[in-house]
Image: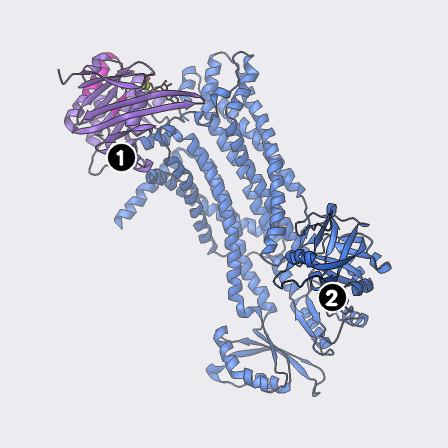
Chain colours: A blue, B purple
Amino acid sequence: MEYIIEYLRRNISLAWKGVFFHLRQYVSFFIAMLVIQTMYGIVTFSNDRNNKLEYGIISEVYDYDLMFIDLNEQQRLTLVNDTMTVFGDEHIFDLVRETPRAEEGSYDRRYDIYIKFVGDKDSALAEFQSRYYDELSSLSKEGFRVSASPMMSYESYRIQSAFYYLAFAAILTAVSVYFMMNLYSIRLNHYSFTYGIYMTFGADFKKLFSTAAWEMLIINFITFIPSCIIAALIDLIIYSAGGSGFTFHFFGIFKVLLFSLIITLTSVTLPMLRFSRQETMRALLAEDNSNLVVSPRKSFDFHKKKYPLVYEFAGLWRFRRYYVKQTAAAVVFTAIFICGAFLSYEKAYSVSLDMPQFMFNFGSNNSYTSTEYKELSEIEGITGIEKNFSCRADEIKSHVLFSKPNVKTSEVIYDEAHPDMAATNFVLYHPGDEETVGILGKGSFEGDLSGILSSDRNIIISDSIKNTYGFDFNPGDKVLIAKNTGKIKEIDGMFTGLELLREQFRFYRFGYEEYTICAVLNDDVTITGMNIYMSDKAFYDLTGMEVSYKSASLYIDKNTDVETTRAIYDSLREYAGYYNGATVRNLEQSMDYKVESSKQKPGTYAAVASLVVIGTPLIWLFSQILYYKKRENEFDILQAFGSTEGEIKRIYVIDAVFSAVLGILFCVIMDWLALKGIYYLTNVVLPMFYRETIRYPFVIPVWALAAALLLTLVSAVASSMVPYILYLKSKEVKQEPSDILAETESV
Amino acid sequence: MLILQAENVIKQYRQYDEVIYAVNRASLKVEDGEFVAIMGSSGSGKSTFLHVMAGLIRPDYGHVKIRGNDITEMPQDELNRFRGQFIGMVFQKHNLIPQLTALENIMIPTVMCNKEEFHFEEHLKKLITTLKISDRLNHLPSELSGGQQQRVAIARAMINRPQVLFADEPTGNLDRANADEVLDLLLKTREVIGQTIVMVTHDISIAEKADKIYIMDNGGLELYKDNKAI
Ligand SMILES: Nc1ncnc2c1ncn2[C@@H]1O[C@H](COP(=O)(O)OP(=O)(O)OP(=O)(O)O)[C@@H](O)[C@H]1O
Ligand SMILES: [Mg+2]
């Protein structure tokens, strides 16, 4: 124990001295650590706050554990009476609510009953099932229907959200490690000689690592508390601006500390490991910037030319790999920033979308007609109705042919029999009438939607496939829709999707009808494929199915409160009672909206992204200051041989211009790629793993791009001009020329 | 007992299509406690050979064994530790760390390599008085004269009492009197701890004090004179 304390004391005091005697060298690390910890703080504190708040919102909506649907009088009494009897310990549930339907005393009198368990939910459920399920079944010839609320499995939901936090933290960790590792590599690169001497006199990786790690840990601890305070303040601002409250959960600071320790140690380990594995002499040779020189032989022959201008370019050329590397390393942070800005935009977009609150199924013997439309519209609180009926192309052995220039997706196949055409069977055919046209009209489209009402040869088509942009259609373009007309051979049942279509091309015969696109839908998506709307008659001709809408999605105002939503639901249940077998499913979209909008994700993403981008000026400045510090020697010698101060200044200025041009070039390329990449990731890759129902429009976050370019420009210029100012200052202090030469040795 | 054995060492530098044989099949055997001097014209490969023997450069071919351990085959990490334990190095260019004071520079080996049960305080005192740098300890290398820098570098190489000391022109920057004093110090330490010394020098009068003198020519090494045998 004593030994451990002594060990800690010695190392901490050594590292403390190391950091404070060279405070200027470590400024970048302080800032970087502050940024990283603040990022973690923002994400962690807001995550803790969101979890708490989310639980609040969800448990207000789901104030029950089980919901019994349409119980009759006797079934009801079984439950209700039992809660009133006091069984002491055996009391396992409370009655939350009951909603009766139809006249009191009538045979049709039905109840929805909501109960909540007391104590541990799982054991209470088991007990409840053994006590009541048989009895409830026996009291009605239809048995009974029950559905569990998400509260029954809230723990697993929590695990899922913890997983998201960890995934996000992992991304942040990767970015942070990259950030710190870059800084540390720059440091190692410039202090290579010092560490080489350490190696000469016996330092192994462990030794080198521990000298470095202790210093970094000290920095870590110094910035920790300020970072947490800044993070909490930023969260406070984000949530207050968004109109919701922020509560701070103290425990979060330990997560921040843990992550920042992991980051620090990883980002020191890797560069140091690589460094300590090299030949010692190689490390020693880098006393000046010679380790950054690419090839002396390939430099310009500036002797024969007029000295000044070419000399500056010679420097740029010799250090070209250094310039490219450090510019790329610095500018990458603007690309990460753009990704954050884009995610922030997407999050805001997804929160702003309207989603249906209820799904009304009319049962197998009923269907939705204009009567139902009228009656449902009249229910208080319903703001929109979307009837659903469709037919999958592959189910009726159909597919669609597009002319090649229209196709921008790979979800198609090409068949020899149809040159210049692409085919897909990832298609949903929909019948459409005036009501459909009205609903589609609320989305984003081009062309004339009512075209399908005037001609059976017109269709409305979506330009997306599987939730992503896939086709470049214009109104007036033609497509061919196939109808199966016979077969040569039966196809094995194991084929699906495009494989199935390929087989069908070989063994089936098709007849094609040409349709004209009268309108193109831009934001109409389905995970199954693409939507095509046509007149009822055309739909019947193609599919052989009578148009009969079996379900409708119902919309309510997103801000509707819990009580009102329940009332609307009860009215719908009442209405469903008139239809045999009809059901209403509450999708709880307004709850999701409340949860999502209160999380203020767009603000959080934007804040984190804005912090990350500090990496750009930081890396650039740090690297260039060290680089120039070593070149000062060279400039002094140049001056000793007669070059003027103006000529020296020109070296810095030309470097600034060059860095700016290179930086802007990198910024444009990297940011553009990043934007495309993150769009592809969120719109194509991620939807493969979970059912994404949103197609995000590709929007260039102009303000973010402008900010990135400006920052790149400023950082590039500053990274050359700040070292120049430092150089001038250091010369002011020292008057004697010999002093100047002496000082250049001590970086 | 053989303490150092270099066999057929080759080190070549390749620059594009040009190949320079800095060390070309050099072999050297040194007994424990011996003092060996290497002489030769500029660019003949003396420093490179010394660096190879100290494990700072890996040869392209050949082996170097110190105390029976083949350091050319050793993993880098182990090699660094080994060097810390048994080898001292004085560079031709003093190679002091510019940010550290003279004393801090001298102390580097004791910080980087913990030799068990070794108290350097006494030794340090003797070193700095003999090397006449006791009043310059708190100066940065840039504030020292060339000779002082060299003497600090010698102190650094000797502070841990390495069994084998490689010195690349340690007296190059010193005047006659100082050079002789430094050499006396080296030889005295050798007597006390039985140190082995391999020294590159241009100074024939210093070389004369060595047990053996080798000449390096164009990367090859030849015995020039064996003072012990005479
Ligand atoms: N890192 C290197 N890359 C390329 N060539 C090198 C390198 N180091 C040394 N050389 C070349 O190897 C040869 C031997 O160099 P070395 O420094 O060993 O000579 P030396 O005998 O110590 O000379 P001096 O007495 O001048 O110190 C020289 O021709 C030198 O140019
Ligand atoms: Mg030499």
Instruction: Name the element at disc 2.
Output: loop
Residue A109 in percent (x, y) is at 69, 84
Is B170 a magenta residue?
A: yes
Q: Residue lying farthest left?
A: B230
Residue B117 in percent (x, y) is at 19, 38
Q: Which mark is residue B82?
A: 1
- Circle 1 packing at 10 Å, graded few (<14), some (14-19), many (20+), is many
Q: Amino acid at mark 1?
A: Phe
Residue A709 in percent (x, y) is at 62, 36
Q: Badge 2 is on which residue? A: A389
Residue at the image point whose x is 32% and y is 45% from the top: A8
On the question of residue B212 being in view, the answer is: yes
Q: Same subunit under labels 2 and 1?
A: no
Q: Residue lying farthest right?
A: A454
Instruction: Name the element at disc 1.
Output: helix
Is A138 a magenta residue?
A: no
Task: Tell which quarter ligand 2 is in.
Answer: top left
Say whether residue B43 is left or right of residue A219. Answer: left
Instruction: Work out how far the residue at label 2 is from the one at label 1, CA to CA, in angstroms.
Output: 80 Å
Q: Amino acid at mark 2?
A: Phe
- Circle 2 packing at 10 Å, graded few (<14), some (14-19), many (20+), is some
Above or below, comparing residue A379 to residue A605 in the picture: below
Question: Mark 2 — on which chain does it sit?
Answer: A
The residues colored magenta run: B166-185
Residue at the image point whose x is 69% and y is 47% from the top: A408
Image quarter where the N terminus of chain B lies is top left
Residue at the image point whose x is 60% and y is 55% from the top: A688
Quarter of the view holding residue A741:
top left
Say whether residue A394 is left or right of residue B147. Answer: right
Above or below, comparing residue B144 to residue A719 in the picture: above
